[in-house]
Amino acid sequence: MRAALAHVPADAFVVGAFDAGGPFLDASLGAMPFFQFEAARADALRAELDAFLRRRTGLTLAKVGALAFFCSPAGCAALLPGVAGVLLPALSAPGDETLDLAVAQRGSLLMVGMPAAVAAARAADGSDALAAPLVALVAERITGSAGSVAAVDFMAIPEEEVRTTVAQFGVKRGALSIMGSMLRVEAFGPEPRLRGLVRMIEGGIAMALTMLEVKKERAVEDGPLLEGASMIIAAHLAAQAKASLQLKVEGGRLLVEAPLGLNSATVLPLIGALAAVAIPAFMKYMRKAKTAEAVKNVKSLYDGARTYYENASGAGLGRAKRAFPPSARMAPPLGTCCSQPDHKCQVDASLWNNATWNMLKFSMDDPHYYSYEFISSGVGSDAVFTARAIGDLDCDSNYSTFEMVGSINALDGSLVGSAGLFNQNELD
């Protein structure tokens, strides 16, 4: 396996390895779910298949039981160690029409993939490749026994949307491995951000289980027989999975472990069913968590306006002359956050350095998702104000609005506030 990993280009942003614990064909025959090959029949199948592949490719693949793979800016490719024979010249031409792939051989290593990726793999060779962070991560976890590992450098992925989404959680690299009956997911980044991610994962799981329980209750109440039975089973399996899930942060690493006690025929449909519920719920939970910024700051603006108005009496101003701080335009301008890193507005102290924001004792001292404005008019019993936050969480030009309003009671001069915080299109 190390010989294959040594050919992974240094700029790869996805690196993985799979070890079947023996030849692929033997592992495939042993995994047939409905019948078992007799020894003589299995030998005959191996011999015929090997002869066919040797005739068409020039190679013997009977002993191949592992592979490495990668994706880089040049494309993706698979690297198979343990081949014998010599690749036919017709297949080694880039972009062969028969396979629609580039194929190359280096000793006992077969390279298959996009032409530019295969060329990059042929050029990479040696200890430098093995020292690359992602390759080293995979090499440490593939120990020679059956299993699979994949590692990702999120900050190097070409798609900006992926980078910005993952960057919200401070995760720089990640790895997923299946060894024996244990599934392990690792994320690497600053410890405080990883602890925040754990809280978000736990919240998302709780929300997904709640939604699954609601769907179960509806199915049991008036749904078809099979749907009700299936939802009962799914709800209990999901609860058991949550109970067995272990999340812990060690330094700059988040480790998630879960035993795989079910066979693949059971696990895959279950994962699909749970994902259909869990992924939308988790995405909604993440957006909901972002709105906490707007709720907190609109309330802070409201409190600031109230304090300013109440302090005006101490300054000797009579009720008829009191007013709220003057209006302040939207800061920063709408659309600013979506054009900046992580779709967050970066800190700009100059935006908040004016009379109104100072009177309200308000400023944004950390990167943020929302823009803020304060609108006021009138004096005395005619004084009114609106504190507002507007944001575009998924940067699709559909804005969410949070606001609170205040006015003056003409009878006693006290502040009359809105019944609560008004919001429109809360999650965009």
Image (spheres, rainbow, N blue to C red):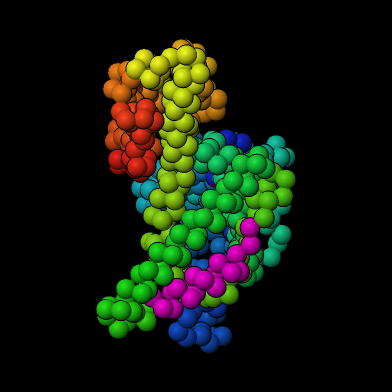
On whether residue 241 falls in the magenta region, the answer is yes
**x then y, percent, for residue 2:** 69, 50
In the rendered structure, which segment of residues is drawn in magenta?
Answer: 231-247
Q: Nearer the viewer, residue 340 or 6?
A: 340
x 30%, y 40%: residue: 424
Q: Position of residue 344 (x, y in %)?
A: 46, 30
Picture coordinates of residue 234, whole percent (x, y): 43, 74
The residue at 29%/36% (across/down) is 398
Position of 409 compared to 241: left or right? left
Left or right relative to 342: residue 11: right
Kindly identify the residue that appears in the image at 46 percent across and 24 percent down.
310
Q: What is the quadrant of residue 13 in the picture? A: top right
The verdict on residue 237 being magenta is yes
In-front residue for pair 123/220? 220
In the displayed structure, 309 sits above or below 270; it is above
The C terminus: image quadrant: top left
Judged by its main secondary structure, the magenta piece is helix
